[in-house]
């Protein structure tokens, strides 16, 4: 007796002399009934769960608006907005240090600000994301 299997993703049909444990286990393969698909056409292929996932443009991450990650992202965004626009490049180093302190996201980052030169502060905090 020949056993026929159908791949739901590709539409391929294969025959085996006995039951194939691997194909029985894989979710995209289905065992055809006796006589089903004898013409090599078991029916239209259906997409698997990967193809049913929401699609986005390349480089765009799906983000959730719930949970601690979303709350942290919102808090960070608000902090960056509150910092305002960067000072002019001709402003004093103290003005840049004050701005950098508002934009810093951790105590470690704040601790390294005094050791940075004005040019380093401008390079790191002058561009707004």
Image (cartoon, grey):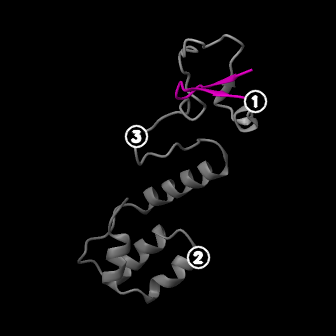
Q: Quadrant of residue 72?
A: bottom right
Q: Which residues are magenta?
A: 1-18
Looking at the image, residue 72 sits to the left or right of residue 92; the answer is right
Mark 1 or 3 closer to N-term? 1
Looking at the image, residue 75 sits to the left or right of residue 129; the answer is right
The residue that mark 1 highlights is 18
Tag 3: Cα neighbours inside 10 Å, few (<14), some, or many (≥20)?
few
The tag on residue 57 is 3
Specify the farthest residue to the bottom. 115
Tag nearer the camera, 2 or 1:
1
- Secondary structure under tag 2 reads helix
Quick check: 17 above or below 122?
above
The residue that mark 2 highlights is 107
Q: Is residue 3 magenta?
A: yes
Looking at the image, residue 13 sits to the left or right of residue 4; the answer is left
- Secondary structure under tag 1 reads loop
Determine the residue positioned at 54% across, 26% down.
Answer: 12
């Amino acid at each position: 007796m020949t056993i026929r299997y159908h791949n739901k993703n590709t539409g391929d049909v294969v025959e085996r002399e006995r039951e194939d444990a691997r194909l029985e286990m894989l979710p995209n393969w289905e065992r055809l009934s006796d006589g089903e698909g004898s013409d090599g056409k078991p029916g239209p292929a259906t997409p698997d769960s990967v193809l049913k996932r929401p699609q986005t443009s390349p480089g765009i991450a799906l983000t959730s608006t719930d949970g601690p990650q979303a709350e942290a992202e919102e808090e960070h965004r608000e902090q960056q907005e509150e910092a305002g626009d960067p000072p002019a490049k001709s402003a004093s180093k103290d003005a840049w240090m004050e701005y950098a302190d508002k934009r810093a996201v951790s105590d470690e980052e704040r601790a390294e600000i005094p050791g940075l030169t004005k040019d380093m502060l401008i390079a790191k905090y002058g561009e707004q994301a």
